[in-house]
Amino acid sequence: MSFNALLPSAKIAVFTQDNQTKDVMASLDGDWRFARVDFDIQIGDVETATTHYESERSPDLLIIQTKDIGEGFLAQLEKLAERCQQGTDCVVIGPVNDVPLYRQLTQMGISDYMVAPIEHDDILSTIASALLVKHGQQDSQLITVLGTKGGVGATSIAQLTAEGLSQRVGQKTLLLDAAGAWSTLPVWMGYEPSVSLKELAMAAQKKDEDTLERIIVTVKDHLSIASTGAQKLMDSELTTEEFEAILNYVMPRFPYVVVDVSSASADIRKLAIQRAEKTLIVTEPNIGGLRVAKSLIGELKELHGGTGAHVIINKTGANKEAEISSGDIKAALDQEPLWSMAWEPKLMSQRDLQDKRFCDLDEGKVLAESLCHALYPSLIGEPEQKQGLLAKLGF
């Protein structure tokens, strides 16, 4: 079972006396897919668990390891079941591969039986299956935005995406720029950067909620931004471990996280795209931009299977002499662009003169709604019902 999403919130208790099993479980505890899962790893066996749950509430999933699968263990397992609340699932790890034993355990209500030594991917698959059957999938979705070069409008597209999801879907959405001091997001979102990305990562690693509440600011209903970008231009770059700590903190808390990775380091771009559900590749409709976009689609197929790569054509009409026709764009990319946006210099000037966020302008709201409508089916799996101004305009 290949799994590339956050697991549902759950409590898991592990009772084992095996060091290899403890190490594997500890590695899962640090895996980003388990960011919502609370692990309790204890040294012990089925008798230890039975005693423990005389006074404690049982978790969503119990994992019990034993060196002896005899009648005594099975009887103790029955006692443990009496101590547990209804709905607690149990996985047993034992020493022998025995089909009749497996059948007997499943008849007793055990979710699964595994043979020691366990491997990381096998126990991950077993836990994921148990939790998904119990709770269903509760994904947070990471969307990365990547420009084919500077100035193509990737930051504007990231803004529109975050605004559209927060307002049209009505879900909490976080907008983050991974560019650090090179970020232009503070200018376009109208905030003064208060901390660096490194400081955000440090607070996330420490789970310093007070500091994180000051950094992650709600700018309107359902839309928040990370007010980063305060570091010096020549400061050392963020490490992948630091950036992963940021993602591990924010993703369980926001159904949608939109990250502009255009000016991030190559390692951070790769990390973010590997974890992303969707990547929006922003380019202009010219030969150079389309060539880079096609190359990025190929690289994303290697990184992520390619199913989440969408191309957005920006600034159509800005340079008509060099512009490629829509039919030739499709042929060049081997896929239809997800969405396109015309070059609107008056709108950009209006934004700057009025000192407003892009999507505070009526035209910006329409664009955000249109982009969200194009993106929505691939995120949710079904077409969004057209609403309000979007339907009237025929998008």
Image: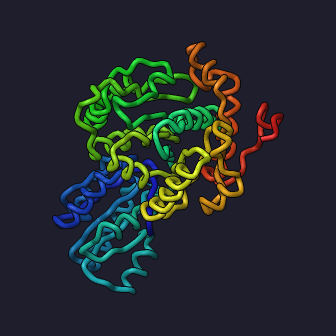
Residue farthest toward the top in the current orientation of the protein: 354
In this rendering, position of residue 21 left or right of residue 145: left
Q: Quadrant of residue 111?
A: bottom left
The front one of 85 and 110 is: 110
- Give x and y (percent) for residue 340: 66, 43
- Give x and y (percent) for residue 121: 34, 68
The residue at 16%/64% (across/down) is 19
- Give x and y (percent) for residue 359: 62, 26
In this rendering, position of residue 377 left or right of residue 153: right
The residue at 66%/23% (across/down) is 346
The mark total stands at: 0
Taking the image as drawn, is residue 72 in sight?
A: no
In this rendering, position of residue 240 left or right of residue 185: left
165, above or below 63, in the image: above
Q: Quadrant of residue 309?
A: bottom right
- Give x and y (percent) for residue 36: 40, 46
In this rendering, position of residue 227 left or right of residue 387: left
Q: Quadrant of residue 193?
A: top left
